[in-house]
Image (tube, rainbow, N blue to C red):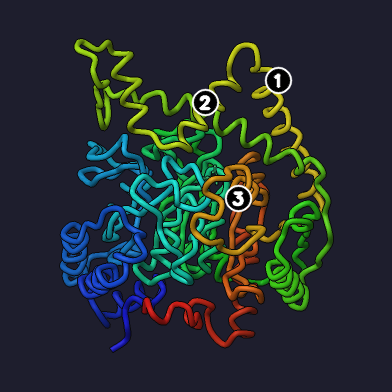
Amino acid sequence: MTDLTRLTADQVARGLSAGEFTSVEVTQASLDRIAAVDGDLHAFLHVDADGALATARGIDDRRGKGEQLSYLAGVPIAVKDVLVTQGMPTTCGSKILEGWIPPYDATVTAKIRAAGLPILGKTNMDEFAMGSSTEHSAYGPTRNPWDRTRIPGGSGGGSAAAVAAFEAPLAVGTDTGGSIRQPGALTGTVGVKPTYGGISRYGLVAMASSLDQAGPVTRTVLDAALLHELIAGHDPMDSTSIPEPVPAVVAAARRADVKGLRIGIVTELGGEGFQPGVRARFDEAVELLASAGAEVVEVSIPSLNYALGAYYLVMPSEASSNLAKFDAMRYGVRVPPAGVDDPSAEQVMSSSRDAGFGDEVKRRIILGTYALSSGYYDAYYGSAQKVRTILARDFTAAFADVDVLVSPTSPTTAYPLGEKLDDPLAMYLGDVATIPANLVGIPGLSLPVGLADEDDLPVGLQFLAPQKADDRLYNAAAALERLLEDTWGGTLLAKAPQLEDVR
Ligand code: GLN
Protein backbone atom coordinates (compact mmCIF):
# COMPACT_ATOMS: atom_id res chain seq x y z
CA MET A 1 0.00 0.00 0.00
CA THR A 2 1.15 3.58 -0.64
CA ASP A 3 2.70 5.38 2.27
CA LEU A 4 -0.06 7.90 2.95
CA THR A 5 2.34 10.36 4.57
CA ARG A 6 4.09 10.78 1.21
CA LEU A 7 1.03 12.10 -0.59
CA THR A 8 0.48 15.79 -1.19
CA ALA A 9 -2.60 17.38 0.35
CA ASP A 10 -4.20 17.48 -3.10
CA GLN A 11 -3.54 13.75 -3.58
CA VAL A 12 -4.97 13.00 -0.13
CA ALA A 13 -8.08 15.07 -0.90
CA ARG A 14 -8.62 13.22 -4.17
CA GLY A 15 -7.99 9.82 -2.58
CA LEU A 16 -10.46 10.59 0.18
CA SER A 17 -13.22 11.62 -2.19
CA ALA A 18 -12.56 8.58 -4.41
CA GLY A 19 -12.88 6.35 -1.34
CA GLU A 20 -9.35 4.94 -1.73
CA PHE A 21 -8.66 5.42 1.98
CA THR A 22 -10.26 7.12 4.96
CA SER A 23 -9.36 10.24 6.90
CA VAL A 24 -8.80 8.06 9.97
CA GLU A 25 -6.18 6.08 8.01
CA VAL A 26 -4.42 9.21 6.76
CA THR A 27 -4.53 10.88 10.16
CA GLN A 28 -3.27 7.75 11.90
CA ALA A 29 -0.41 7.54 9.36
CA SER A 30 0.63 11.10 10.26
CA LEU A 31 0.36 10.36 13.99
CA ASP A 32 2.49 7.21 13.58
CA ARG A 33 5.05 9.18 11.65
CA ILE A 34 5.13 11.84 14.38
CA ALA A 35 5.57 9.12 17.02
CA ALA A 36 8.44 7.64 15.01
CA VAL A 37 10.46 10.75 14.17
CA ASP A 38 9.42 13.68 16.32
CA GLY A 39 11.31 12.61 19.42
CA ASP A 40 14.38 13.55 17.44
CA LEU A 41 13.09 16.43 15.29
CA HIS A 42 10.90 18.17 17.89
CA ALA A 43 8.68 19.86 15.33
CA PHE A 44 5.67 19.59 17.67
CA LEU A 45 5.12 21.14 21.08
CA HIS A 46 1.80 19.39 21.51
CA VAL A 47 0.20 16.47 19.67
CA ASP A 48 -3.56 16.01 19.87
CA ALA A 49 -4.01 12.44 18.66
CA ASP A 50 -7.48 11.98 20.16
CA GLY A 51 -8.82 15.27 18.82
CA ALA A 52 -7.37 14.67 15.34
CA LEU A 53 -8.81 11.16 15.13
CA ALA A 54 -12.21 12.35 16.38
CA THR A 55 -12.34 14.96 13.60
CA ALA A 56 -11.23 12.32 11.08
CA ARG A 57 -13.96 9.89 12.19
CA GLY A 58 -16.56 12.65 11.94
CA ILE A 59 -15.48 13.47 8.38
CA ASP A 60 -15.46 9.79 7.34
CA ASP A 61 -19.02 9.42 8.70
CA ARG A 62 -20.25 12.49 6.88
CA ARG A 63 -18.56 11.41 3.66
CA GLY A 64 -20.16 7.98 4.07
CA LYS A 65 -23.57 9.66 4.23
CA GLY A 66 -22.84 11.46 0.97
CA GLU A 67 -22.61 14.94 2.49
CA GLN A 68 -20.99 17.72 0.46
CA LEU A 69 -17.65 18.44 2.14
CA SER A 70 -14.92 21.03 1.77
CA TYR A 71 -12.19 19.94 -0.71
CA LEU A 72 -9.56 19.53 2.03
CA ALA A 73 -11.94 17.87 4.53
CA GLY A 74 -10.15 15.02 6.27
CA VAL A 75 -6.61 16.14 5.31
CA PRO A 76 -4.51 16.45 8.51
CA ILE A 77 -2.79 19.73 9.34
CA ALA A 78 -0.32 21.12 11.89
CA VAL A 79 -0.74 24.61 13.36
CA LYS A 80 2.00 26.93 14.63
CA ASP A 81 1.72 27.43 18.36
CA VAL A 82 1.12 31.18 18.00
CA LEU A 83 -2.46 30.70 16.73
CA VAL A 84 -4.94 30.15 19.52
CA THR A 85 -6.80 26.85 19.62
CA GLN A 86 -9.76 26.42 21.93
CA GLY A 87 -9.16 23.62 24.42
CA MET A 88 -5.65 22.93 23.12
CA PRO A 89 -2.49 24.44 24.69
CA THR A 90 -1.04 27.57 23.08
CA THR A 91 2.37 28.62 24.38
CA CYS A 92 3.94 30.73 21.60
CA GLY A 93 7.11 28.84 22.48
CA SER A 94 7.26 30.73 25.78
CA LYS A 95 7.35 29.67 29.42
CA ILE A 96 5.13 32.62 30.23
CA LEU A 97 2.16 30.87 28.57
CA GLU A 98 2.96 27.38 29.83
CA GLY A 99 -0.28 25.60 30.66
CA TRP A 100 -2.56 28.21 29.09
CA ILE A 101 -5.57 26.72 27.34
CA PRO A 102 -7.25 29.35 25.15
CA PRO A 103 -11.01 29.75 25.60
CA TYR A 104 -11.52 30.56 21.91
CA ASP A 105 -10.28 29.79 18.39
CA ALA A 106 -8.33 32.09 16.07
CA THR A 107 -10.28 32.75 12.87
CA VAL A 108 -7.71 30.63 10.99
CA THR A 109 -8.25 27.77 13.48
CA ALA A 110 -12.04 28.13 13.21
CA LYS A 111 -11.88 27.96 9.41
CA ILE A 112 -9.71 24.83 9.57
CA ARG A 113 -12.13 23.18 11.99
CA ALA A 114 -15.19 24.20 9.98
CA ALA A 115 -13.66 22.66 6.85
CA GLY A 116 -13.03 19.41 8.74
CA LEU A 117 -9.21 19.19 8.72
CA PRO A 118 -7.94 17.10 11.64
CA ILE A 119 -5.52 19.24 13.69
CA LEU A 120 -2.53 17.05 14.54
CA GLY A 121 -1.09 19.47 17.06
CA LYS A 122 0.84 22.67 17.62
CA THR A 123 4.27 23.27 16.15
CA ASN A 124 7.44 24.59 17.72
CA MET A 125 8.62 28.16 17.18
CA ASP A 126 10.98 30.80 18.47
CA GLU A 127 9.48 32.42 21.55
CA PHE A 128 6.73 34.81 20.42
CA ALA A 129 8.03 34.33 16.85
CA MET A 130 11.23 36.24 17.57
CA GLY A 131 14.09 34.54 15.80
CA SER A 132 15.26 32.87 12.61
CA SER A 133 16.28 29.43 13.86
CA THR A 134 13.67 28.07 16.34
CA GLU A 135 16.51 27.96 18.88
CA HIS A 136 14.77 30.65 20.91
CA SER A 137 11.91 28.30 21.77
CA ALA A 138 11.70 27.94 25.55
CA TYR A 139 11.03 24.24 24.95
CA GLY A 140 14.20 23.45 22.98
CA PRO A 141 15.00 23.72 19.27
CA THR A 142 13.53 21.90 16.28
CA ARG A 143 16.08 20.06 14.13
CA ASN A 144 16.29 20.26 10.35
CA PRO A 145 15.17 16.93 8.81
CA TRP A 146 17.84 17.31 6.10
CA ASP A 147 20.62 17.41 8.69
CA ARG A 148 19.68 17.14 12.31
CA THR A 149 22.71 19.06 13.50
CA ARG A 150 21.30 22.14 11.74
CA ILE A 151 18.56 24.69 12.31
CA PRO A 152 15.28 24.39 10.37
CA GLY A 153 15.00 28.18 10.12
CA GLY A 154 12.59 30.25 12.15
CA SER A 155 10.55 31.37 13.76
CA GLY A 156 8.28 28.71 12.24
CA GLY A 157 10.86 25.91 12.13
CA GLY A 158 8.37 23.48 13.63
CA SER A 159 5.78 23.83 10.87
CA ALA A 160 8.42 23.64 8.13
CA ALA A 161 10.19 20.61 9.63
CA ALA A 162 6.86 18.80 10.17
CA VAL A 163 5.97 19.19 6.49
CA ALA A 164 9.50 18.42 5.23
CA ALA A 165 9.72 15.25 7.34
CA PHE A 166 6.31 13.99 6.15
CA GLU A 167 4.74 14.33 9.60
CA ALA A 168 1.95 16.45 8.08
CA PRO A 169 0.98 17.29 4.49
CA LEU A 170 -0.07 20.80 5.50
CA ALA A 171 0.86 23.33 8.17
CA VAL A 172 0.03 26.90 9.03
CA GLY A 173 2.80 29.34 9.87
CA THR A 174 3.05 33.05 10.56
CA ASP A 175 5.42 35.52 8.97
CA THR A 176 6.37 38.86 10.53
CA GLY A 177 9.73 39.19 8.82
CA GLY A 178 10.18 35.86 7.04
CA SER A 179 9.13 33.16 9.51
CA ILE A 180 7.20 31.18 6.90
CA ARG A 181 9.44 31.79 3.88
CA GLN A 182 12.90 31.40 5.43
CA PRO A 183 12.12 28.04 7.14
CA GLY A 184 10.56 27.01 3.83
CA ALA A 185 13.84 27.76 2.05
CA LEU A 186 15.93 25.97 4.67
CA THR A 187 13.80 22.79 4.70
CA GLY A 188 12.93 22.49 1.00
CA THR A 189 9.24 23.31 1.48
CA VAL A 190 6.87 25.90 0.00
CA GLY A 191 6.04 28.83 2.28
CA VAL A 192 3.74 31.76 1.56
CA LYS A 193 3.26 35.08 3.28
CA PRO A 194 0.02 36.43 1.81
CA THR A 195 -0.76 40.13 1.32
CA TYR A 196 -1.11 41.85 4.70
CA GLY A 197 -4.80 41.69 5.60
CA GLY A 198 -5.48 38.72 3.34
CA ILE A 199 -5.77 36.31 6.26
CA SER A 200 -7.34 37.30 9.56
CA ARG A 201 -5.04 38.06 12.48
CA TYR A 202 -7.84 37.47 15.00
CA GLY A 203 -6.43 34.98 17.51
CA LEU A 204 -2.89 35.19 16.15
CA VAL A 205 -0.93 36.15 19.28
CA ALA A 206 0.57 39.46 18.17
CA MET A 207 4.27 40.09 17.88
CA ALA A 208 4.23 43.16 15.58
CA SER A 209 0.66 43.84 14.50
CA SER A 210 1.47 45.86 11.38
CA LEU A 211 3.72 43.07 10.04
CA ASP A 212 2.22 39.74 11.25
CA GLN A 213 0.50 37.52 8.69
CA ALA A 214 -0.44 33.82 8.75
CA GLY A 215 0.03 31.62 5.69
CA PRO A 216 0.50 28.12 4.26
CA VAL A 217 3.47 25.75 4.67
CA THR A 218 3.31 22.81 2.22
CA ARG A 219 5.29 20.57 -0.11
CA THR A 220 3.76 21.87 -3.37
CA VAL A 221 2.54 25.19 -4.75
CA LEU A 222 -0.94 23.78 -5.44
CA ASP A 223 -1.26 22.58 -1.84
CA ALA A 224 -0.31 26.06 -0.63
CA ALA A 225 -2.96 27.59 -2.87
CA LEU A 226 -5.63 25.18 -1.62
CA LEU A 227 -4.82 26.02 2.00
CA HIS A 228 -4.55 29.74 1.22
CA GLU A 229 -8.09 29.87 -0.15
CA LEU A 230 -9.35 27.93 2.85
CA ILE A 231 -7.93 30.24 5.53
CA ALA A 232 -8.15 33.60 3.70
CA GLY A 233 -11.01 36.07 3.50
CA HIS A 234 -12.51 39.08 5.18
CA ASP A 235 -13.04 38.93 8.92
CA PRO A 236 -14.94 41.62 10.81
CA MET A 237 -12.94 40.62 13.92
CA ASP A 238 -9.75 42.02 12.33
CA SER A 239 -9.96 45.70 11.43
CA THR A 240 -7.02 45.38 9.01
CA SER A 241 -8.63 42.50 7.12
CA ILE A 242 -9.13 43.13 3.37
CA PRO A 243 -12.83 43.31 2.45
CA GLU A 244 -12.39 42.34 -1.21
CA PRO A 245 -12.64 38.75 -2.47
CA VAL A 246 -9.63 36.45 -2.05
CA PRO A 247 -7.40 36.33 -5.17
CA ALA A 248 -8.01 33.17 -7.23
CA VAL A 249 -4.79 31.47 -6.14
CA VAL A 250 -5.83 27.87 -6.88
CA ALA A 251 -6.72 28.73 -10.47
CA ALA A 252 -3.39 30.56 -10.76
CA ALA A 253 -1.45 27.55 -9.42
CA ARG A 254 -3.19 25.36 -11.99
CA ARG A 255 -2.49 27.84 -14.80
CA ALA A 256 1.32 27.79 -14.23
CA ASP A 257 2.23 29.80 -17.31
CA VAL A 258 5.00 32.39 -17.34
CA LYS A 259 4.97 33.16 -21.05
CA GLY A 260 5.30 36.94 -21.35
CA LEU A 261 5.48 37.41 -17.58
CA ARG A 262 7.83 40.24 -16.67
CA ILE A 263 10.19 39.16 -13.89
CA GLY A 264 12.55 41.55 -12.06
CA ILE A 265 15.68 40.34 -10.27
CA VAL A 266 16.24 42.61 -7.28
CA THR A 267 19.85 43.85 -7.41
CA GLU A 268 20.07 44.61 -3.69
CA LEU A 269 18.89 41.14 -2.62
CA GLY A 270 21.53 38.82 -3.91
CA GLY A 271 25.05 40.20 -4.03
CA GLU A 272 27.60 40.22 -1.27
CA GLY A 273 26.88 37.92 1.68
CA PHE A 274 24.91 35.41 -0.39
CA GLN A 275 26.38 31.89 -0.38
CA PRO A 276 27.70 30.85 -3.83
CA GLY A 277 25.53 27.71 -3.92
CA VAL A 278 22.46 29.80 -3.16
CA ARG A 279 23.30 32.18 -5.99
CA ALA A 280 23.98 29.33 -8.42
CA ARG A 281 20.61 27.61 -7.86
CA PHE A 282 18.85 30.97 -7.99
CA ASP A 283 20.48 31.93 -11.30
CA GLU A 284 19.63 28.56 -12.86
CA ALA A 285 16.00 28.84 -11.76
CA VAL A 286 15.72 32.29 -13.30
CA GLU A 287 17.18 30.91 -16.53
CA LEU A 288 14.54 28.19 -16.53
CA LEU A 289 11.83 30.84 -16.21
CA ALA A 290 13.35 32.75 -19.11
CA SER A 291 13.48 29.57 -21.20
CA ALA A 292 9.74 29.17 -20.59
CA GLY A 293 9.06 32.58 -22.07
CA ALA A 294 9.37 34.99 -19.14
CA GLU A 295 11.03 38.35 -19.76
CA VAL A 296 13.74 38.78 -17.15
CA VAL A 297 15.18 42.17 -16.23
CA GLU A 298 17.22 43.53 -13.35
CA VAL A 299 15.55 45.99 -10.98
CA SER A 300 17.30 48.16 -8.41
CA ILE A 301 15.51 49.33 -5.26
CA PRO A 302 18.21 51.30 -3.37
CA SER A 303 16.02 51.97 -0.31
CA LEU A 304 16.15 48.23 0.41
CA ASN A 305 19.48 48.87 2.11
CA TYR A 306 17.54 50.48 4.98
CA ALA A 307 14.84 47.81 5.31
CA LEU A 308 16.57 45.57 7.84
CA GLY A 309 17.37 48.54 10.09
CA ALA A 310 13.80 49.83 9.87
CA TYR A 311 12.36 46.40 10.65
CA TYR A 312 14.48 45.96 13.76
CA LEU A 313 13.05 49.23 15.10
CA VAL A 314 9.39 48.84 14.08
CA MET A 315 9.16 45.18 15.09
CA PRO A 316 10.57 45.52 18.65
CA SER A 317 8.56 48.73 19.18
CA GLU A 318 5.29 47.01 18.38
CA ALA A 319 6.32 43.88 20.28
CA SER A 320 7.22 45.84 23.41
CA SER A 321 3.67 47.19 23.45
CA ASN A 322 1.95 43.90 22.49
CA LEU A 323 3.82 41.89 25.10
CA ALA A 324 2.90 44.27 27.93
CA LYS A 325 -0.25 42.21 28.47
CA PHE A 326 1.79 39.30 29.85
CA ASP A 327 1.71 40.73 33.32
CA ALA A 328 1.09 37.60 35.43
CA MET A 329 -2.43 38.86 36.20
CA ARG A 330 -4.30 37.58 33.16
CA TYR A 331 -2.42 34.72 31.48
CA GLY A 332 0.08 32.00 32.18
CA VAL A 333 2.64 31.76 34.92
CA ARG A 334 2.87 33.87 38.05
CA VAL A 335 6.21 33.76 39.85
CA PRO A 336 6.29 35.66 43.15
CA PRO A 337 9.58 37.41 43.92
CA ALA A 338 11.83 35.37 46.19
CA GLY A 339 12.24 36.60 49.76
CA VAL A 340 9.52 39.29 49.61
CA ASP A 341 6.72 38.76 52.16
CA ASP A 342 3.97 40.93 50.81
CA PRO A 343 4.92 41.70 47.20
CA SER A 344 3.26 44.52 45.28
CA ALA A 345 1.57 43.86 41.93
CA GLU A 346 4.53 45.52 40.25
CA GLN A 347 7.01 43.23 41.99
CA VAL A 348 5.01 40.13 40.97
CA MET A 349 4.81 41.40 37.40
CA SER A 350 8.52 42.04 37.28
CA SER A 351 9.57 38.66 38.72
CA SER A 352 7.07 36.79 36.53
CA ARG A 353 8.27 38.49 33.36
CA ASP A 354 11.86 37.89 34.42
CA ALA A 355 11.19 34.17 34.85
CA GLY A 356 8.73 33.77 31.97
CA PHE A 357 10.48 35.53 29.07
CA GLY A 358 13.69 34.33 27.41
CA ASP A 359 16.71 36.45 26.50
CA GLU A 360 15.70 37.29 22.91
CA VAL A 361 12.25 38.47 23.99
CA LYS A 362 13.73 40.60 26.75
CA ARG A 363 16.29 42.03 24.32
CA ARG A 364 13.55 43.12 21.92
CA ILE A 365 11.28 44.52 24.64
CA ILE A 366 14.18 46.66 25.85
CA LEU A 367 15.05 47.75 22.30
CA GLY A 368 11.43 48.60 21.50
CA THR A 369 10.80 50.45 24.73
CA TYR A 370 13.92 52.51 24.11
CA ALA A 371 12.97 53.28 20.49
CA LEU A 372 9.54 54.47 21.64
CA SER A 373 10.74 56.53 24.60
CA SER A 374 9.93 60.24 24.45
CA GLY A 375 13.47 61.47 23.81
CA TYR A 376 14.18 58.98 21.03
CA TYR A 377 10.83 58.37 19.37
CA ASP A 378 11.43 60.67 16.39
CA ALA A 379 15.02 59.57 15.88
CA TYR A 380 14.27 55.84 15.86
CA TYR A 381 10.64 54.78 15.49
CA GLY A 382 9.74 57.89 13.47
CA SER A 383 12.67 57.44 11.07
CA ALA A 384 11.87 53.75 10.62
CA GLN A 385 8.30 54.60 9.65
CA LYS A 386 9.62 57.07 7.07
CA VAL A 387 11.82 54.36 5.57
CA ARG A 388 8.74 52.18 5.36
CA THR A 389 6.90 54.83 3.36
CA ILE A 390 9.84 55.27 0.97
CA LEU A 391 10.13 51.51 0.51
CA ALA A 392 6.44 51.21 -0.32
CA ARG A 393 6.78 53.96 -2.89
CA ASP A 394 9.84 52.30 -4.45
CA PHE A 395 8.15 48.91 -4.66
CA THR A 396 5.13 50.48 -6.34
CA ALA A 397 7.48 52.06 -8.89
CA ALA A 398 9.24 48.73 -9.47
CA PHE A 399 5.95 46.93 -10.04
CA ALA A 400 5.05 49.43 -12.74
CA ASP A 401 7.70 47.74 -14.91
CA VAL A 402 7.53 44.09 -13.81
CA ASP A 403 4.80 41.65 -12.73
CA VAL A 404 6.81 39.86 -10.05
CA LEU A 405 10.17 40.36 -8.35
CA VAL A 406 12.55 37.53 -7.45
CA SER A 407 15.47 37.01 -5.07
CA PRO A 408 16.99 34.18 -3.08
CA THR A 409 14.80 33.70 0.03
CA SER A 410 17.72 33.42 2.44
CA PRO A 411 21.38 34.39 1.95
CA THR A 412 22.54 31.01 3.26
CA THR A 413 21.37 27.45 3.64
CA ALA A 414 20.64 25.97 7.09
CA TYR A 415 23.51 26.64 9.49
CA PRO A 416 24.59 24.46 12.45
CA LEU A 417 22.57 24.69 15.67
CA GLY A 418 24.26 27.14 18.03
CA GLU A 419 26.26 28.92 15.33
CA LYS A 420 24.47 32.28 15.56
CA LEU A 421 22.78 31.92 18.93
CA ASP A 422 25.15 34.29 20.69
CA ASP A 423 25.32 36.78 17.85
CA PRO A 424 21.86 38.31 17.39
CA LEU A 425 23.01 40.73 14.68
CA ALA A 426 24.41 37.91 12.55
CA MET A 427 21.11 36.09 12.89
CA TYR A 428 19.11 39.23 11.97
CA LEU A 429 21.11 39.54 8.73
CA GLY A 430 19.58 36.28 7.53
CA ASP A 431 16.23 38.09 7.22
CA VAL A 432 17.47 40.66 4.74
CA ALA A 433 15.52 39.32 1.75
CA THR A 434 12.25 38.45 3.48
CA ILE A 435 11.70 41.50 5.69
CA PRO A 436 10.87 44.06 2.95
CA ALA A 437 7.62 42.28 2.03
CA ASN A 438 6.35 42.62 5.60
CA LEU A 439 7.32 46.28 5.81
CA VAL A 440 5.29 47.11 2.69
CA GLY A 441 2.50 44.55 3.08
CA ILE A 442 3.09 42.71 -0.21
CA PRO A 443 2.83 38.92 -0.64
CA GLY A 444 5.86 36.62 -0.93
CA LEU A 445 6.35 32.93 -1.69
CA SER A 446 9.43 30.76 -1.23
CA LEU A 447 9.90 27.79 -3.56
CA PRO A 448 12.62 25.13 -3.22
CA VAL A 449 14.92 25.37 -6.26
CA GLY A 450 17.57 22.75 -5.52
CA LEU A 451 20.51 22.02 -3.25
CA ALA A 452 23.60 24.16 -2.76
CA ASP A 453 26.77 22.51 -4.10
CA GLU A 454 28.84 23.19 -1.00
CA ASP A 455 26.55 21.46 1.54
CA ASP A 456 23.73 19.66 -0.33
CA LEU A 457 21.14 21.65 1.58
CA PRO A 458 17.94 23.22 0.17
CA VAL A 459 17.87 26.65 -1.44
CA GLY A 460 14.72 28.76 -1.77
CA LEU A 461 13.74 31.31 -4.41
CA GLN A 462 11.40 34.09 -3.33
CA PHE A 463 8.71 35.59 -5.56
CA LEU A 464 7.22 38.96 -4.58
CA ALA A 465 4.09 40.55 -6.08
CA PRO A 466 2.09 43.74 -5.52
CA GLN A 467 -0.49 43.91 -2.74
CA LYS A 468 -3.56 41.76 -3.42
CA ALA A 469 -1.87 40.10 -6.42
CA ASP A 470 -1.07 36.89 -4.54
CA ASP A 471 -2.30 34.92 -7.58
CA ARG A 472 0.76 36.09 -9.54
CA LEU A 473 3.03 34.34 -7.03
CA TYR A 474 1.18 31.06 -7.38
CA ASN A 475 1.15 31.18 -11.16
CA ALA A 476 4.87 31.90 -11.46
CA ALA A 477 5.92 29.50 -8.69
CA ALA A 478 3.81 26.65 -10.04
CA ALA A 479 5.36 27.15 -13.47
CA LEU A 480 8.88 27.06 -12.03
CA GLU A 481 8.01 24.06 -9.84
CA ARG A 482 6.92 22.16 -12.94
CA LEU A 483 10.07 23.10 -14.87
CA LEU A 484 12.29 22.06 -11.94
CA GLU A 485 10.51 18.75 -11.41
CA ASP A 486 10.97 17.97 -15.10
CA THR A 487 14.68 18.63 -14.63
CA TRP A 488 14.93 16.54 -11.46
CA GLY A 489 12.52 13.83 -12.52
CA GLY A 490 10.46 14.25 -9.33
CA THR A 491 10.13 16.51 -6.32
CA LEU A 492 13.11 17.70 -4.33
CA LEU A 493 11.90 16.20 -1.05
CA ALA A 494 11.18 12.81 -2.56
CA LYS A 495 14.76 12.67 -3.78
CA ALA A 496 16.43 13.85 -0.58
CA PRO A 497 19.03 11.29 0.51
CA GLN A 498 19.34 13.08 3.85
CA LEU A 499 15.73 12.18 4.63
CA GLU A 500 16.30 8.44 4.25
CA ASP A 501 16.83 7.84 7.95
CA VAL A 502 13.76 9.76 9.01
CA ARG A 503 11.60 8.11 6.40
N1 GLN B 1 13.37 36.30 11.91
C1 GLN B 1 12.60 37.51 12.03
C2 GLN B 1 12.67 38.02 13.44
O1 GLN B 1 13.37 37.48 14.20
C3 GLN B 1 11.19 37.28 11.58
C4 GLN B 1 10.37 36.59 12.58
C5 GLN B 1 8.99 36.31 12.09
O2 GLN B 1 8.69 36.43 10.90
N2 GLN B 1 8.11 35.98 13.02
O3 GLN B 1 12.02 38.94 13.80
Residue under label 1, please give it.
Answer: 379
Q: Which mark is residue 366?
A: 2
Q: Secondary structure at mark 1?
A: helix
Question: In this rendering, does residue 107 appear at all?
Answer: no
| Mark 1 burial class by Cα count in 10 Å: few <14, some 14-19, many 20+ | few
Q: Does the numbered disc 2 mark a residue whose Cβ is under 8 Å from ligand 1?
A: no
Residue under label 3, please give it.
Answer: 443
- Earlier residue among tags 3 and 1: 1
**Residue contact at pointers 2 and 1, CB within 8 angstroms:** no
The x and y percentages for residue 82 are 38, 44
Q: Secondary structure at mark 2?
A: helix
The x and y percentages for residue 349 are 32, 20
Question: In this rendering, does residue 140 appear at all?
Answer: yes
Q: Nearer the viewer, residue 242 or 94?
A: 94
Q: Quadrant of residue 84?
A: top left
**Residue contact at pointers 2 and 3, CB within 8 angstroms:** no
The x and y percentages for residue 373 are 58, 15
- Earlier residue among tags 2 and 3: 2
Q: Name the residue rendered at 73%, 76% in the picture.
A: 288
Q: Name the residue rendered at 44%, 34% in the picture.
A: 238
Give the quarter of the figure containing the C terminus: bottom left
What amino acid does circle 2 point to?
Ile
Q: Quadrant of residue 13?
A: bottom left
Q: Name the residue rendered at 74%, 38% in the picture.
A: 306
Q: Name the residue rendered at 56%, 67% in the picture.
A: 253
- Earlier residue among tags 2 and 1: 2
What amino acid does circle 3 point to?
Pro
Give left or right: position of 311 versus 4.
right
Q: Secondary structure at mark 3?
A: loop
CA distance separating discs 2 and 3:
30 Å
What amino acid does circle 1 point to?
Ala
